[in-house]
Image (cartoon, rainbow, N blue to C red):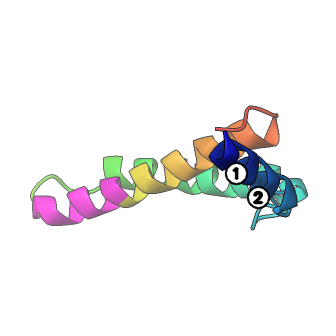
Amino acid sequence: MADYQSLKALHASLPPFSPSVPVALLPYLAFLLLGLTFALAFYSSTLPKNTFPIRETAVASIASILGGFGVVALFCSVGVYV
């Protein structure tokens, strides 16, 4: 029980969590990241089909990463903290 009490005291003494990105900036960040995702998806759909698939894969990977971070920023901006 002494370990629990010491951990509880340590927990109470720690500073509260503060996000590295301001919460007021999240909607704009989500809009920017998701806008770039859709722009890259459009660009990927207009690439000529006789090129190397490496270029298409790189564009799709960047769009996927931007879309993932954009969705997380969008969820956090509406109060669903994931």
Residue found 75% across the figure and 46% down from its top: 5
Location of mark 2 (residue):
10
Q: Residue at x 70, y 36 (%)?
A: 75
Give the residue type that dot 1 points to: Leu
Q: Tell me the CA gap for discs 2 and 1.
A: 5 Å
Q: Secondary structure at mark 2?
A: helix
Q: Please name the residue shown 12% across and 58% down the image.
A: 53
Query: Amino acid type of disc 2?
Result: Leu
Q: Quadrant of residue 28?
A: bottom right
| Direction from residue 51 to residue 7 in the image, left or right | right
Q: Secondary structure at mark 1?
A: helix
The C terminus, quarter of image: top right
> Where is residue 4 shown, x and y percent of the image?
68, 43
- Mark 1 and mark 2 in contact (Cβ < 8 Å)? yes
Tell me the quadrant of the picture where the N terminus can be found: top right
In the image shown, does 33 or 25 lie closer to the viewer? 25
Q: Nearer the viewer, residue 80 or 13?
A: 13
The range drawn in magenta is 52-61
Q: Nearer the viewer, residue 4 or 46?
A: 4
Location of mark 1 (residue): 7
Quarter assignment of residue 43 = bottom left
Image coords of residue 29 (percent x, y): 73, 58
Q: Is residue 46 visible?
A: no
